[in-house]
Image: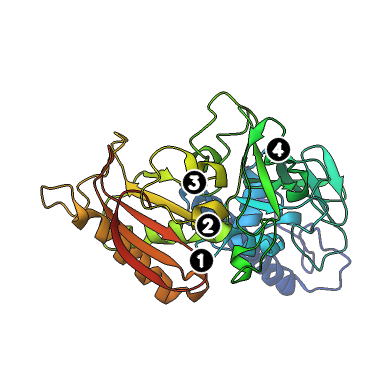
Amino acid sequence: MKKYVLPPGARPHSPWRGSGLTWKQERVFFWLSLILILTVLTGWSISVIELRSGRSTPVSSPIARSIIDGSKKATPFINEAALEFFDPLRGESGELEAAFRLPGKDVARTSNPQMKLRFGEKVAGNFAAPSDPGVYKLAVQIDRITREISDLRVITLVPFGEKERGKIGTYTVGTWPYENGGKPKSERYANPSGFIEVTLQNRDTKVSQHFKLRDFLTKDQPTVWPKYLLLDPLLLDKLELTIQELKKQGYKVEHVTVMSGFRTPRYNHSGGNVAGRANLSRHMYGDAADVFVDNDRNGSTDDVNRDGRIDLGDTEVVSRAAERVEREHPSLVGGIGTYAACCGHGPFTHVDVRGYRARWRGSGNG
């Protein structure tokens, strides 16, 4: 085959012809462009691989996610950085999954005027909680781009004023200590602002990583629905941080049972075994819980300290973890009490966020 030879002074056909570049400059530009393209492709490939393996960096993850996510909802236009205004709702533990608000009260604040909040199918430009009580899924919207917030929801409360003659609807709650007069010793003992309405349909709603609404319900009036509940997010935060602390120390914690959460005033004074219950019990204000580690879910505390016995030693492991949480998070200071087995139940730990330090050891009910 005859080899084709360019005439003297001629140049091969080039896509850059007419650009003013010399043949040598064209070759340098070509190789630099090729290197740049290969570098970008390599970086994007690494980002996609890291995202799939869970090792993606904050910079690469939104871009890589937009490549592999067919839904197109979690795009770089509404990435994690754009949702940082939700962080305070997750508490100091980072594991709260519900925000409780009275009707019309702000859920969160953002400096982005284009951002809107969706409550289920409703769009609210001012980020105010819906007027109707209930549990609402959250989504953020900018123009036509929507990002669902799967691990956070808003629960609109029923205002305290809806209670009449000790009842809300057909559910009896009773009367709070200072409802008919007198001055509370602190704001923590004032009348509640509102109640969570718990139905058969929403009782399994998660309020944090390890807890659901149903865990904190008063154990009375089993056939009456809806029920009404007080639940302080600071209590949830303290419980989640206590679980984190236990895990740090090497204790296995897969499930924590709430033996007693919210108690209506009616139940606190007259329901079940009332031995040891205080007239101003924090349980009536939704910021106290009696808990124990119950990984096998048999309704009794586990041998947490692995000494072959189930006794106060197991509850003290939990109380010491809660104590450390208070030292690291002063906003969660409150009561911590340990209780021995009694009256048909095993040992447990009482935890609350009353706002001042209290410690005790007792028997009976927390």
Q: Nearer the viewer, mark 3 or mark 1?
A: 3
Secondary structure type for disc 2: loop
Residue 34 in view of the camera: no
How far apart are the alpha carbons under marks 3 and 1?
A: 17 Å
Outermost residue on the top side: it is 223
Q: Residue at x 25, y 60 (%)?
A: 316
* Amino acid type, label 1: Arg
Using a 10 Å C-alpha cutoff, classify the residue at mark 2 as few (fewer than 14 neighbours), some (14 to 19) or many (20 or more): many
- Which residue was labeled with disc 2? 287
Mark positioned earlier in the residue sequence (2 or 1): 2
Query: Which numbered disc flags the more N-terminal residue, 2 or 4?
Result: 4
On screen, residue 202 above or below 288: above
Query: Is 233 positioned to the left or the right of 111 in the image?
Result: left
The residue lying toward the viewer, choosing from 81 and 302, is 302
Q: Would you name the residue on which mark 3 appears?
A: 268
Q: Amino acid at mark 4?
A: Ile
- Residue 211 at x, y percent in the picture: 48, 45
Relative depth, front residue between 31 and 143? 143
Q: Which mark is residue 354?
A: 1
Q: CA distance from mark 2 to mark 4?
A: 20 Å
Q: Which is in the foreground here, disc 2 or disc 4?
A: 4
| Image location (x, y in percent) of residue 224 | 61, 26
